[in-house]
Structures are given as structure tokens and as C-alpha cells.
Image (spheres, rainbow, N blue to C red):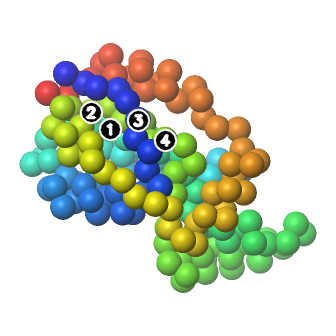
Amino acid sequence: MAILSFIHICDLNKFASYLNKYGVDIEEYNHTIFHDSSEFAMFICKKNSRTIAYLAAHYIDAHYAALANLSEGASDTDIIEALINAEKGGMWRAPVEPVIYIASDEFVKIIKNYSDSFPENAVVYINQYRGEAVLLRSLVDSMTVLAKYLDLD
């Protein structure tokens, strides 16, 4: 049976590592960057080559931070350089909303005790983003429709 729910995750990289410890592989299914420089990605989680979950994450990362640090009149060259250099300070990904999932019971058991905190260098940008953004409230509706068509057990 497929379960539709959400989990509060602060550090997508730590969450991926946590899942890997339980033999869960994560594949990015699709990815987009919004006009506000936040990102949205869908992930497929597999264990023993069997799909056990789909995740939907709306997040910001080191690229968002690099752009946020630019002056308002930054040139195209400044923007490109900032994006290229963004990962030099360490790549982090921090969800700005709960991560929604459609999953099997097995996946839910794996994540039920998971908790983390925001990467230290992400906190200021999370607060900045949450003060400015319109969050993706319709995502739950989309995932509900998708859940009707999935068989994860």
C-alpha cells in the first residue's frame, strides 16, 4: 500500500546518507530551478532495485546563497562566476518546506526516527527565503493524485 505523507528534513545531503546506510539508493528523477532561485526535485528511492518511495523536495542550496550575496546590479559575468564558485564553500541543500513522499511501509519504517538540523551555513538563507517566498502548497494535491496510480508494495 502506498502512503502519502511528509517529513521535516533540514539537510537533504544528510538524509540521503542516512538512507544509504539502510541500503536505499536515491535517484534524481527530475529537477527544476524556480525564478526565485529555489529548486524543486523529485527523487526515486530504491532498495534492492525495487522502488520503495518517491520524494518531492522544494529546497535552496549553495547556488541560492551565491546569488543572494550578489549586489542587485550584478553583471551576467558576476552571476556566472558566483554560480561556478558556489560549491567551493561546500555544497548543501536545505528544504524550505516539508519533503513530501509517497512510500511503502518499508520506507516509512526506515525514516520514522530520522531527525537532523540545518547545515550551519544555510540557516541565514533559509530564514531569508522563508521571509520572501510563496511556498508550494499545491504540491500536496499533486502528490495525492500521483499516489492513486502507484503501487509500491
Between disc 2 and disc 3, whose residue precedes? 3
Residue ID for mark 3: 6
The quarter holding residue 2 reads top left
Residue ID for mark 4: 98
Between disc 3 and disc 1, whose residue precedes? 3
- Residue sitting at 24 percent across and 37 percent down? 108
Residue 142 visible somewhere in the drawing: yes
Distance between the Cα atoms at labels 4 and 1? 14 Å
Q: Position of residue 111 (x, y in %)?
A: 27, 45
Q: Position of residue 153 (x, y in %)?
A: 14, 27
Front: mark 2 or 3: 3
Q: Amino acid at mark 4?
A: Pro
Q: Amino acid at mark 1?
A: Tyr
- Residue sitting at 47 percent across and 55 percent down? 10
Residue ID for mark 2: 103
Residue ID for mark 1: 54
Q: Is residue 136 left or right of residue 93?
A: right
Front: mark 1 or 2: 2
The quarter holding residue 102 reads top left
Distance between the Cα atoms at labels 3 and 4? 6 Å
Distance between the Cα atoms at labels 3 and 1? 11 Å
Q: Is residue 103 left or right of residue 142?
A: left
Q: Are marks 1 and 2 in contact (CB under 8 Å)?
A: yes
Between disc 4 and disc 1, whose residue precedes? 1
Q: Is residue 131 left or right of residue 119?
A: right
Residue 51 visible somewhere in the drawing: no
Front: mark 2 or 4: 4
Q: Are marks 3 and 4 in contact (CB under 8 Å)?
A: yes
The mark tally for this picture is 4
